[in-house]
Image (tube, rainbow, N blue to C red):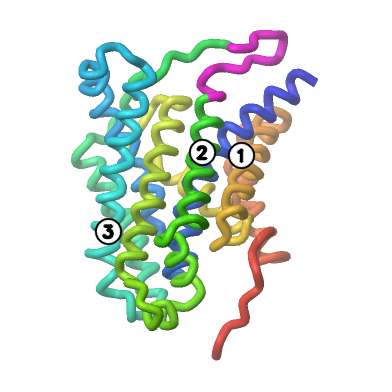
Amino acid sequence: MSEFLQQVINGVSLGSIYALIALGYTMIYGILRFINFAHGDVFMIGAFVGYYAAPQVMKIAGGSVFLSAILVMLIAMIVCSVLGVTIEKLAYRPLRSRPKLTVLITAIGMSFFLEYGGQLVFGPDPKLFPTLFPSAAIVNAKNLVISTNSVVVIVTALALMLLLRLIVFKTKLGTAMRAVSYDHRAAALMGINIDTVISFTFVLGSSLAAAAALLYASVYPSINPLMGIFPGLKAFIAAVLGGIGNLFGAALGGLIIGLTETFVTGYISPTFRDAIAFAILILILLFKPSGIMGRHEAEKV
């Protein structure tokens, strides 16, 4: 039983990180109706911003672990927000009236640009991410270890998801986002600035990816310029599984993928850890392409 509980905690911790990344995919799809494949690489940039910012911030914070972690996360979120808005303005906005396939190919190109640009700037070798908060065992029993790392990841992810929900459902910009997601033209006729809403969506999605990157690097401290590929793909699968375009679905999908991956690793074999996520993607596309929480939308011809 304790081993099962250990897998659940590990799965929720990993799933919380996937959920934060998946929320970025699902928000951008909900507004622009395309998959931003560069989102996983924004996640990677967030980790490297944290890597370079942490030593300086720790000196300024004077040894306060909590303050250092908060400041490093805020810096990474701000830098990635600026990066996300820049990508949208330079790469996606000029193509907004073009076919979605054109934008999709551009997103893949942007992903490669960030990955190989990252290797040029940061170097191809893995780097050891600094310890933002020391890990200690809260519970240490037979087959069950609950560390502060797991608790921090779950609590931070939950707080950010609740904050996102508050922004989307209780603020004017959130209301504008929901209006634009239904109909761009009608929202524009109502006086909503579409460009501002889209930029704000990229700010939210990119900042959540940066926060997820710092949580991920705190648990798996080896970072490299290609580290965004697999977490990004799994978060994309989580968004599709939950129903892409649906915020609650993205969070639910992230938890399901995290739990499934952890149980497969613990009870079957780590070899199948990545394969099972893609098997889930194939199954969901075959039997329920709209996802668990998604709605079927008729295509106009």
Cα distance between the residues tagged 2 and 3: 23 Å
Residue 274 point in image, percent of width and height: 58, 42
Cα distance between the residues tagged 1 and 3: 29 Å
Is 143 within the magenta?
yes
What residue is rendered at 46% in x and 52% in y? 167
Give yes or no for contact between labels 2 and 1 (Cβ–Cβ under 8 Å): yes
- Identify which amino acid the numbered label 1 is placed on: Gly
State whether residue 298 is above or below residue 94: below
Residue 197 point in image, percent of width and height: 36, 65
What residue is rendered at 40% in x and 79% in y? 190
Q: Secondary structure at mark 1?
A: helix
* Mark closer to the chain start, 2 or 3: 2
**Disc 2 marks which residue?**
17
Q: Which residues are magenta?
A: 138-151
Q: Residues within 10 Å of mark 2 (few under 14, many from 20)?
A: many
Q: Residue furthest right?
A: 1
Is 271 within the magenta?
no
Q: Secondary structure at mark 3?
A: helix
State whether residue 299 is above or below residue 135: below
**Disc 3 marks which residue?**
87
> Left of 236 or right of it: where is 268?
right
> Left of 216 or right of it: where is 75?
left
Q: Quadrant of residue 73?
A: top left
Q: Nearer the viewer, residue 166 or 300?
A: 166
Residue 215 point in image, percent of width and height: 45, 31
Name the mark on residue 258.
1
Cα distance between the residues tagged 2 and 1: 8 Å
Q: Is residue 34 visible in this depiction of the protein? A: no
